[in-house]
Amino acid sequence: MLTWFASQPTRGAGAYSRKTPNTSARTTYNRLMNPAVILWIAEALGEDPQVVQAAGEKVLSVPSRSRAGAARKVLPWSRIVELAHNLD
């Protein structure tokens, strides 16, 4: 994950190349394809455990290719930002 995150502000390489570097945290979050990472971010930011649990259950109820999207439906970028701002 660290390598993937570190590559976002670059043009990438090979199959992961892009025309312009990504400097948006929102875009990076929305590109995550691993639902476990989405759940982990929310948990690490202090999301209510019941909400994280509900997101995990939602993830397991859909086909594997749809799981990251299912996690983001319960834990959208706006909620992640809110949780991050509440860390102060």
Image: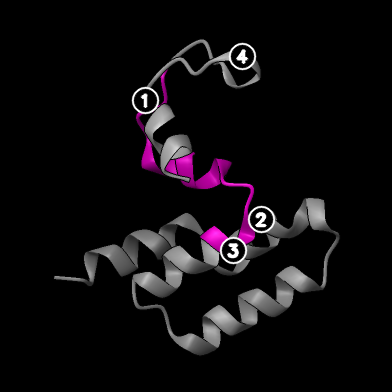
What's the residue at 71%, 79% (across, down)? 57
Classify 12 as above or below 43: above
Mark 2 / mark 1, whichever is N-terminal? 1
Query: Eyeballing the image, is 49 above or below 84?
Result: below
| Residue depth check, mark 2 versus mark 4: number of the one nearer the observer | 4
Tell me the residue at 65%/75% (across/down).
Answer: 56
| CA distance separating discs 2 and 1 | 22 Å
- Mark 3 element type: helix
> What separation in Å lies between label 2 and label 4 (alpha carbons)?
23 Å
Return the residue at label 4: 14
**Residue denoted by label 1:** 9
Q: CA distance from mark 1 to mark 3?
A: 23 Å
Residue 39, position as x, y percentages in the image: 53, 68
Q: Earlier in the sequence, mark 2 or mark 4?
A: 4
In the image, is residue 25 part of the stretch drawn in magenta? Answer: yes
User: The residue under label 2 is which amino acid type?
Assistant: Ala
- Residue type beneath disc 4: Gly
Observer-nearest residue: 15 or 22? Answer: 15
Q: In the image as oriented, which residue stretches furthest toward the bottom?
A: 50
| Disc 4 secondary structure class | helix
**Crowd tier of the residue under label 3, counting other residues whose Cα lies within 10 Å: few below 14, some 14–19, many 20 or above:** some
Q: Earlier in the sequence, mark 1 or mark 3?
A: 1
